[in-house]
Image (cartoon, coloured by chain):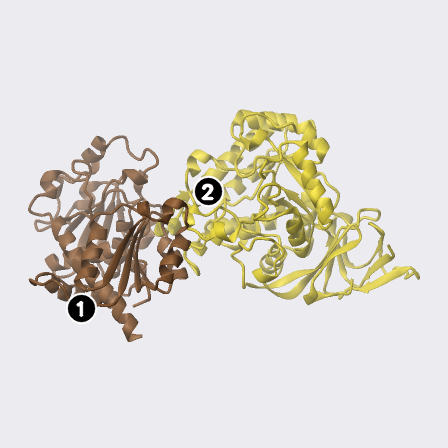
Chain colours: A brown, B yellow
Amino acid sequence: MKKDLLGIGDLTSDEIYLILDTTEAMREIGQRPIKKVPTLRGKTIVNLFYEPSTRTRTSFEIAEKRLSADTLNIAATTSSAQKGETLADTALNIEAMAPDMIVLRHASSGAGHLLSRLCKSRIINAGDGMHEHPTQALLDAFTIREHKKRLEGLKVTIVGDLLHSRVLRSNVLLLTTLGAEVWVCGPATLLPPGIERLGVHVSTAIDEAVADADVIMMLRIQQERMHGAFFPSTREYFNTFGMTRARLAHAKPDVIIMHPGPMNRGVEIASDVADGPYSVILEQVANGVAVRMAVLYLLAGGAEGD
Amino acid sequence: MPKLLLKGGRVVDPANGRDGAFDLLIDGDRIARVGRDLPVDRDVAVVEVPSGFIICPGLIDMHVHLREPGQEHKETVATGVAAAVAGGFTAVACMPNTSPVNDNAGVTEYILKKAAEANLARVYPIGAVSRGQKGEQLADIAELKQAGCVALTDDGHPVATAMLMRRALEYAGMFDLPVIEHCEEQTLKTDGVAHEGFQASALGLRGIPGEAESIMALRDIALAELTRGVVHIAHMSARQTLDAVRWGKSRGARVTCEVTPHHFVLTDEMLAAPVPYDTNVKMNPPLREAADRDAMLAGIADGSVDVIATDHAPHHYDEKRVEFDRAPFGITGLETAVSLCFDRLVHAGVISIARLVELLSINPARIMRVAGGSLSEGAPADISVLAPDLRVTISVERMRSKSKNTPFDGWHLRGGVAATIVGGRTVYQNDDAAIGL
């Protein structure tokens, strides 16, 4: 593996499978009475979060602790960023204290690339702007594989705010690399121009996109990234693109419903779907810890192997 | 000053229909004679110019940000003109988005005073269209003209409203001042940072479509027709804008346009590689797609494009070493333009050297109604000596600009500058192509 995990684009399909296979082993650790192994003892990992995050930050922290790493969290609201320090300076100061890895969440696309150029520490991208969120795509792939036993040939439909979604970009890269048939669907105002060049089917008609799907992934409507009127109202959005039981009927009978969270119930997904029998949303969260353990372990192991 | 005879070079002076081996005699600050085998009097110092070198009218960059007053950490008039002459330019026109804005005679005079102190390239200030570049009220245009401004612009932004642009074109016409327009429909650009297309989509960057530029160009061309005013479209980047300019010219509108070297050399693929999210490929207008880049080359070749200008936009290292979406727009250009033009236009077979002289000297002089653009006898001796086959490696270490924000560092290019002469005085000589001036 490369020094850093900045995006799915950094990984070969072999590396993706290696991470997914390693995740199986890591998940077993989480099922033990004592959920801790000494694998990353003596390693220091800094979780540098410039955006609010509950799921991802907690998930990384639990993963780090289960591997016995020394971990600390820096939230931008309590850091020198409030005093006007640049990301580059913050990173260099953290780097001066010689951590082994920095897990970065940032509102700007490419923030991880900036750190990667400045730091010897390994950088793990925990979400950069509208660009990538690679560990989310990995945990999604793990969850799909667990249910479907494969990824190749599956019809995976991703619905929602495609334009602003880093989850979309990482998932498209990963799923197309592993041979899934990926459909993306959302309002025409939220389609990233040229997205079809990534090898996906693009549709603005949800029934067509959902038809015979093996997997449906709902994306959050990201009010905080929308600086404009992309659709008339959340009510109209739900009526046109929201996932309901009626729409689900077009998919395969064993379809699974996924959502990276946090959910806007009644906007992109009806509660009875989110909480219903097809939903694997909480499994995704559970698998997130094991996937992140695998990524941390493999990146750190790479360091020892060098 | 003794007389100086340049002997042996290839004189390219399209304004006088000359292209060939001529001698050029400089007497004081003027061109005294141009001809074959001029006699060498005793008071004449002779400089043998290698036969492959070009002697042409001084290059004029009509779109430069010198940053002074107010942003001297990026550039000063002195460092800017040092960069200009090292880039082969004998004159630059500087944009008014300084701090304070060049919207009054005091700022214009300050810039001209700094330029006189530096005493390298000629500096032609461009005044603001509107007071404070706020887009509300016209600046004191008569006063700006009198103080020495050669054109007007709200560069950095478009002239805010159609009505203000109409008034500016009408009013500036009285003073023979062209209005230079930064074309951008801001409600379409919004907070975009890169060309809207596949690259921006893949990298998660907010897009700016080419139409944000062409819509404004179409507005301004229509207003130029309405008012019979003169509009010059700055740093054109989109193929739709080129079509708009061609349409305007075909109707007889008084419209001209410029293209920067980076827009005819680079595309938005630079956002992804070799350095992902390199803030030195962030500029406004953004690098566009190959189809746009190719359209710019076609427009340069067929005459639709009038001028090559650099949009030299120095920014401090600290300002560029930030997240892509937080970095300021702009790159430096004065010290890379000639090499890029030779390598990508002349040697690539897009245009002749004579056409290059038109784009870099004759047309900017004509549009801004300033001296230059020819090697006529009696004209000021503003001369660029160019070395078309010089192997150049772009190096920020060697640059004279105060800022180093260029994506071309390390590039190997064919063609460069040998010397720059302003008012008969040698203000720059390249050690790599020394001719003993």
Query: Residue B236, image x and y in percent?
Result: 54, 43
Kindly tell me whether residue B281 is visible in this rendering.
no
Residue, far right: B42
Residue at 71%, 36% (x, y): give it. B148
**Residue at numbered disc 2:** B210
Return the mark for residue B121: none
Image point 51% across, 51% down: which residue? Answer: B293
Direction from residue B322 to residue A153 in the image, left or right:
left
Secondary structure of the residue carrying tag 1 is loop
Residue B427 visible from this viewpoint: yes
- Chain under label 2? B
Mark 1 surroundings: few (<14), some (14-19) or many (≥20) residues within 10 A: few
Type of the residue with mark 1: Pro
Q: Depth check: give the residue in front, A79 or B264.
A: A79
Is B82 in front, or is A249? B82
Q: Is residue B418 left or right of residue A45?
A: right
Q: Nearer the viewer, residue B39 or B47?
A: B47
Residue that carries the numbered disc 1 in the rendered image: A38
Neighbours of disc 2 within 10 Å: few (<14), some (14-19), many (20+): many
> What is the distance, in whole Å, between disc 1 and disc 2 at their CAs?
55 Å
Q: Is residue A52 left or right of residue B267?
A: left
Q: Position of residue B264 (x, y in %)?
A: 54, 52
Residue at image x 62%, y 41%? Answer: B69
Residue placed furthest toward the bottom: A305
Mark 1 in CB contact with mark 2 (< 8 angstroms)? no
Counting from the top left corner in percent of width and height, residue A89 is at: 41, 54
Residue type (three-letter) at the residue carrying disc 2:
Gly
